[in-house]
Amino acid sequence: MPLLTVTELTKNFGGLRAVAGFSFTVEPGEILGLIGPNGAGKTTVFNLITGFLHPTSGHIFLDGRSVVGLRPHAVTRRGIARTFQLVKPFPKLSARENVTLAAFIHESSRRRAESAAGQILERVGLVEKLDSPAADLTLSEQKRLEIARALATRPQLLLLDEPMGGLNPREVDEASTLVKRIRADGVSIVLVEHVMKAIMRISDRVVVIHHGEKIADGAPDRVVQDPTVIAAYLGGRVA
Amino acid sequence: MTRAAAVAVVLLLMLAPPLVTSNQFLLHLGITVLLWTLLGASWNLLGGFGGQVSFGHATFFGVGAYATMILYLRLGLAPWYGMVLGGVAAVAVSLPIGLICFRLRGPYFSLSTLAVAEIVRLIALNWEALTNGPVGLLITTLPRVALGARAINWESKVPFYYIIAALAVLAMAATWWLSRARLGAYLLAIREDEDAAEAVGIDTVRAKVLTLALSAFFTGLAGGFYGLYFRYVDPDAVFPIALSVEMVFIAVVGGLATVIGPVIGAVFLTTIGELFRERFLVGHLIFYGLFMMLAIRFLPEGIWGGARRVWTGRR
């Protein structure tokens, strides 16, 4: 059974149909790349799955249980964590405190929550920045901090919204390694990204969204050759 | 060790004045400072930790004050229980207010609390059957309370001093507790970024409503104390916007989300308020306002926050 099943997901904003009958699945242990031109509806899909927006119609199941209608914190507690396209760290709090807050939902003792936070920050390579305020970290570090914070909620599924956007090539490589390591630890991942080289290399499967609809779904090397996908990106018509 | 010593010094400074002086004016000034400390600390629980700037806390003060007075005058309930029930009444009022106002964020939340507070003030002014309207409620005598063999003398200010000092210490203890508790950590997350807080699994509405209730409880207790100390309440005295604003000032000037900040804020604003009133008579509020502007401009973390930064920076 798939870990996540999304069927016929639709979201209207007034007269605008941002997501239109969009269906896809995520298998346990999979890295799924979700790509599409700007404004295609990728972030809207994330917001719908995580409860920040409510769908106009359609279904979302995690492990066979519906998560539609839950508030974001409840979705997180069910096992879906996310990061944000524009990073949202807790700026005045230290890196350790940022992650400790998230660990608190499973650990009532501060000492245990802090030690869990320390371990996770080590995993994402932020161990030297434990006591720095999040606002003082570089963009790359803030993105890793957000991933650490999401991991502290012990997710089954992690939704990463452009974890490589704005990073230099070396940082992109580091982020790719990190994503693969997280999957190796048993967390399934949906990745929204514009850095094509990276997403093609680390995704097991790629879903392409355009104008809120799915136009392709398959192995990365097959999807890039799909004429519909090429047309969507280059703005032309399918011959 | 230094921490324990600091706590002892603060407690001593708060509790000692009646032992040192019997000057009625000084004791009254002490009671005023402690009442403002209690109010600043109550507001600070939600505003300082959670970053939810309420401009409507006078509501809880007024509800606490009226509940205490009405329970005593109409039902003959001893005001010492009544004061606690005043806090409970404030909690009861806080729940619907929280559920309404917390749908909004930032400045919109602040404006909605201001609006609700005005609504409640107008209700108190017009519901004459319950509140006696603009005439207010007056207590002539307080019931006898025996302390050992002697009865407490309610004509003296000393017993009131100790009651308000105990309440202020209690509110500061609650602040300390919140700074260590999980709820306090959740509030910091909410203050920093509400969406991110939800994303890490924090029920932000629940955390805010709970904290508002705690904050309202202490504010309601303060209102009950006010009623008993002055033995008179009317809507203009216990529901004004100025009261809500003053609570914000004390917490901000003292230092947000700190245990000691509200004491410092209350001492400063009470003494400066008195000094300006004496010096400038009619124009005193202009200077008071100017002082507030300077304080917020140059000490955005408050007096205690600024002092702490200088201190840790030097070490």
Image (cartoon, helix red, strand yellow):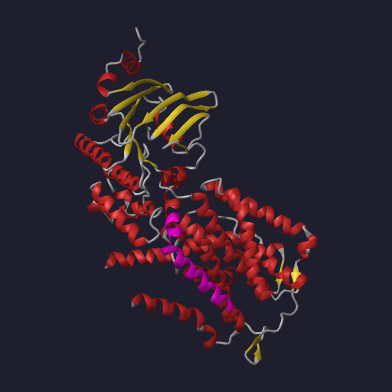
Q: Is residue B167 magenta?
A: yes
State the quadrant of the N terminus of chain B.
bottom left
Q: Is residue B179 magenta?
A: yes
Does residue A204 appear left or right of residue B38 in this picture? left
Image position of B19 with respect to A174: above or below? below
User: How many labels were placed on the picture?
Assistant: 0
Asked whether A62 or B30 is in front, the reply is: A62
State the quadrant of the C terminus of chain B.
bottom left
Asked whether B285 or B312 is in front, the reply is: B312
Outermost residue to the top: A239
Prevailing secondary structure class for the magenta stretch in the rendered image: helix
The percent coordinates of residue B196 (x first, y second) are: 41, 45
Asked whether A88 or B240 is in front, the reply is: A88
Does residue A225 appear left or right of residue A17 in this picture? left
Does residue A195 appear left or right of residue A24 in this picture? left
Asked whether B34 or B49 is in front, the reply is: B49
Q: Can residue A114 be seen? A: yes
The percent coordinates of residue B179 (x first, y second) are: 43, 63
Q: What residue span does the magenta drawing correspond to?
A: B163-187
The percent coordinates of residue A53 (x first, y second) are: 49, 35
Q: Residue at x 50, y 72 (%)?
A: B267
Outermost residue to the bottom: B149
Outermost residue to the left: A170
Q: Residue at x 33, y 35 (%)?
A: A28
Q: Residue at x 28, y 44 (%)?
A: A144
